[in-house]
Image: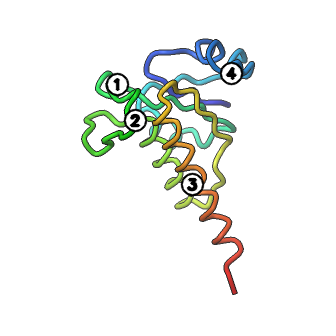
Amino acid sequence: MKIFLDDERIPQDARKHTGNDIYNQEDWILVRSFDEFKEYIQNTGLPELISFDHDLAHEHYKYCFSKHIPYSEFIVKTGYHCLLWLILFCNMNSKSLPQILIHTRNEQGKNNMINLCETYIMLALMKANPAK
Protein backbone atom coordinates (compact mmCIF):
# COMPACT_ATOMS: atom_id res chain seq x y z
CA MET A 1 0.00 0.00 0.00
CA LYS A 2 1.22 3.49 -0.88
CA ILE A 3 -0.23 6.86 0.12
CA PHE A 4 -0.17 9.82 -2.24
CA LEU A 5 -0.77 13.01 -0.23
CA ASP A 6 -1.83 15.89 -2.47
CA ASP A 7 -4.76 18.26 -2.42
CA GLU A 8 -5.29 18.29 -6.21
CA ARG A 9 -2.99 16.03 -8.21
CA ILE A 10 -2.90 12.32 -8.85
CA PRO A 11 0.24 10.13 -8.88
CA GLN A 12 0.59 10.28 -12.67
CA ASP A 13 0.90 14.08 -12.39
CA ALA A 14 3.89 13.62 -10.07
CA ARG A 15 5.44 11.23 -12.60
CA LYS A 16 5.44 14.04 -15.17
CA HIS A 17 7.59 16.40 -13.10
CA THR A 18 9.69 13.93 -11.08
CA GLY A 19 10.42 11.37 -13.78
CA ASN A 20 9.91 8.60 -11.20
CA ASP A 21 8.04 5.65 -12.73
CA ILE A 22 6.73 4.55 -9.33
CA TYR A 23 3.95 7.10 -9.83
CA ASN A 24 2.63 5.03 -12.75
CA GLN A 25 1.82 2.13 -10.44
CA GLU A 26 -1.84 1.66 -9.63
CA ASP A 27 -1.87 0.81 -5.91
CA TRP A 28 -1.84 4.40 -4.59
CA ILE A 29 -4.32 5.57 -1.98
CA LEU A 30 -5.16 9.25 -2.54
CA VAL A 31 -5.24 11.37 0.61
CA ARG A 32 -6.08 15.06 0.30
CA SER A 33 -5.60 16.66 3.75
CA PHE A 34 -3.90 16.41 7.14
CA ASP A 35 -7.07 15.05 8.74
CA GLU A 36 -7.52 12.38 6.04
CA PHE A 37 -3.83 11.47 6.33
CA LYS A 38 -3.96 11.06 10.08
CA GLU A 39 -7.27 9.19 10.04
CA TYR A 40 -6.16 6.80 7.31
CA ILE A 41 -2.97 5.80 9.10
CA GLN A 42 -4.67 5.48 12.49
CA ASN A 43 -7.41 3.27 11.01
CA THR A 44 -5.41 1.27 8.47
CA GLY A 45 -1.83 1.28 9.70
CA LEU A 46 1.40 2.43 8.14
CA PRO A 47 1.84 2.03 4.41
CA GLU A 48 5.08 0.86 2.81
CA LEU A 49 5.56 4.25 1.12
CA ILE A 50 4.19 7.81 1.34
CA SER A 51 4.65 10.51 -1.27
CA PHE A 52 4.18 14.03 0.08
CA ASP A 53 3.01 17.26 -1.44
CA HIS A 54 3.79 20.28 0.71
CA ASP A 55 1.04 22.75 -0.18
CA LEU A 56 -2.35 21.29 0.67
CA ALA A 57 -4.45 24.47 0.40
CA HIS A 58 -4.57 27.71 -1.55
CA GLU A 59 -3.28 29.67 1.47
CA HIS A 60 0.04 27.80 1.11
CA TYR A 61 0.62 28.60 -2.56
CA LYS A 62 1.75 32.17 -1.99
CA TYR A 63 4.82 30.78 -0.19
CA CYS A 64 5.94 28.54 -3.08
CA PHE A 65 8.91 30.80 -3.81
CA SER A 66 9.53 32.07 -0.31
CA LYS A 67 12.60 31.36 1.82
CA HIS A 68 10.45 31.34 4.98
CA ILE A 69 7.18 29.45 5.40
CA PRO A 70 5.07 30.62 8.38
CA TYR A 71 3.72 27.21 9.44
CA SER A 72 2.14 28.48 12.65
CA GLU A 73 0.03 31.02 10.74
CA PHE A 74 -1.75 28.54 8.47
CA ILE A 75 -5.34 27.53 9.04
CA VAL A 76 -4.97 24.39 6.92
CA LYS A 77 -2.04 22.11 7.71
CA THR A 78 0.64 21.37 5.12
CA GLY A 79 2.44 18.23 4.04
CA TYR A 80 5.19 19.30 6.46
CA HIS A 81 2.66 19.02 9.30
CA CYS A 82 1.67 15.56 8.04
CA LEU A 83 5.29 14.43 8.01
CA LEU A 84 5.86 15.80 11.50
CA TRP A 85 2.74 14.00 12.76
CA LEU A 86 3.95 10.78 11.08
CA ILE A 87 7.34 11.01 12.77
CA LEU A 88 5.73 11.55 16.17
CA PHE A 89 3.25 8.72 15.54
CA CYS A 90 6.03 6.29 14.59
CA ASN A 91 8.16 7.36 17.54
CA MET A 92 5.34 7.02 20.07
CA ASN A 93 4.35 3.60 18.70
CA SER A 94 7.89 2.24 18.23
CA LYS A 95 7.38 1.91 14.48
CA SER A 96 9.81 2.52 11.66
CA LEU A 97 9.05 5.28 9.20
CA PRO A 98 7.78 4.06 5.86
CA GLN A 99 9.71 4.97 2.73
CA ILE A 100 9.28 8.70 2.05
CA LEU A 101 9.08 10.47 -1.30
CA ILE A 102 8.46 14.19 -1.69
CA HIS A 103 6.84 15.24 -4.95
CA THR A 104 6.04 18.86 -4.10
CA ARG A 105 7.11 21.65 -6.44
CA ASN A 106 7.60 24.01 -3.49
CA GLU A 107 11.40 23.95 -3.14
CA GLN A 108 11.55 25.52 0.33
CA GLY A 109 8.78 23.24 1.57
CA LYS A 110 10.64 20.26 0.11
CA ASN A 111 13.87 21.37 1.81
CA ASN A 112 12.05 21.76 5.12
CA MET A 113 10.62 18.25 4.82
CA ILE A 114 13.99 16.76 3.88
CA ASN A 115 15.59 18.50 6.87
CA LEU A 116 12.86 17.12 9.13
CA CYS A 117 13.54 13.57 7.88
CA GLU A 118 17.30 13.98 8.23
CA THR A 119 16.94 15.30 11.78
CA TYR A 120 14.70 12.37 12.70
CA ILE A 121 17.18 9.88 11.23
CA MET A 122 20.10 11.53 13.02
CA LEU A 123 18.28 11.47 16.36
CA ALA A 124 17.24 7.85 15.85
CA LEU A 125 20.86 6.89 15.17
CA MET A 126 22.03 8.77 18.26
CA LYS A 127 19.38 7.01 20.34
CA ALA A 128 20.39 3.61 18.96
CA ASN A 129 24.12 4.28 19.47
CA PRO A 130 24.48 6.56 22.52
CA ALA A 131 27.91 8.01 23.23
CA LYS A 132 29.70 6.33 26.11
For the residues carrying marks 3 and 2, which lies nearer the camera in this image? 2
- Residue at the disc numbered 3: 90
In space, the residues marked 4 and 2 are separated at their CA atoms by 23 Å
Residue at image coords 56%, 57%: 119
How many labels, in total?
4
- Element under disc 2: loop
Q: Which residue is mark 4?
A: 27
Which of pointers 4 and 1 indicates the residue nearer the eye? Answer: 1
Residue 93: percent from left, percent from top: 56, 59
Q: Amino acid at mark 3?
A: Cys
Q: Point out residue 84 in the picture as x, y percentages from the top left corner.
A: 47, 48
Q: What amino acid type should be assigned to the residue bearing mark 4?
A: Asp
> In the image, what residue type sits under mark 1?
Ala
- Of label 4 and label 2, which has the lower sequence position? 4
Are the two marked residues, 4 and 1, in contact with CB atoms closer than 8 angstroms? no
Say which residue label 1 marks: 57
Real-space Cα distance between discs 4 and 3? 23 Å
Q: Which callout, 3 or 1, points to the residue nearer the camera? A: 1
